[in-house]
Image: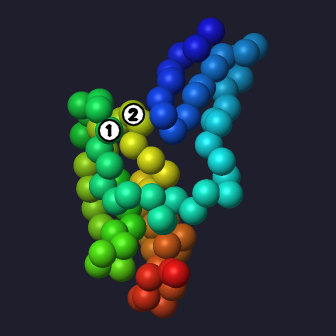
Amino acid sequence: ETIAVSSERKYESRRGKSWSGRNKNTDPCKDEFGVTGPCLALFTKWGFNSTSGKCEEFTYGGCQGNGNKFDTEKECRNRCEVRGDAKT
């Protein structure tokens, strides 16, 4: 039984288990910044803006989007910023 399908992930229920099809080797910091997705929820997330070289707040709609979304600024900075400079 498929419970959600998006361009980023596919979740299926098999004996009560879910999993993500996302490639764990992909660097989410290189994904486009601020992708809201087509859903209409209003979740505050943090993403790495490669133009400014900093983590910034944006609104996520709750589905699709990409990997460049973090629950906290600290999580984003730890993953995407190095001593105040953008990772290259």
Tell me the element at label 2: loop
Tell me the element at label 1: loop
Residue 43, compared with residue 72, is above or below; it is above
Point out which mark residue 18 bears. Answer: none
> Which residue is at a point 57% across and 62% down the rendered structure image?
27
The residue indicated by pointer 2 is 63
Residue 44 at least partly seen: no
Residue 38, compared with residue 49, is above or below; it is above
> Which residue is at a point 29% across and 78% down the rendered structure image?
52
Residue 55, compared with residue 71, is above or below; it is below
> Which residue is at a point 67% across and 32% down the rendered structure image?
19
Q: Residues within 10 Å of mark 2 (few under 14, many from 20)?
A: some
Which quadrant, please, contains the N terminus? top right
Q: Work out whether residue 31 or residue 80 is closer to the camera in this orientation and state it.
A: 31
Q: Residues within 10 Å of mark 1 (few under 14, many from 20)?
A: some
Q: Quadrant of residue 76?
A: bottom left
Point out which mark residue 37 bears. Answer: 1
Q: Work out whether residue 60 or residue 26 is closer to the camera in this orientation and state it.
A: 26
Q: Work out whether mark 1 precedes mark 2 in sequence or the reverse, and give the earlier one.
A: 1
Check the image and tell me how it is coloured: rainbow
Q: Position of residue 81 (x, y in %)?
A: 47, 79
Q: Are marks 1 and 2 in contact (CB under 8 Å)?
A: yes
Give the residue type that dot 1 points to: Gly
Please state if 19 lies on the left or on the right of 37 as rendered.
Answer: right
Q: Position of residue 24 (x, y in %)?
A: 67, 52
Give the residue type that dot 2 points to: Cys
Q: Position of residue 88 (x, y in %)?
A: 52, 81
Please state if 57 lies on the left or on the right of 19 as rendered.
Answer: left
Q: Distance from label 1 to label 2 (Cα)?
A: 6 Å
> Which residue is at a point 43% across and 88% down the rendered structure image?
85
Residue 77 at least partly seen: yes
Q: Position of residue 39 (x, y in %)?
A: 29, 30
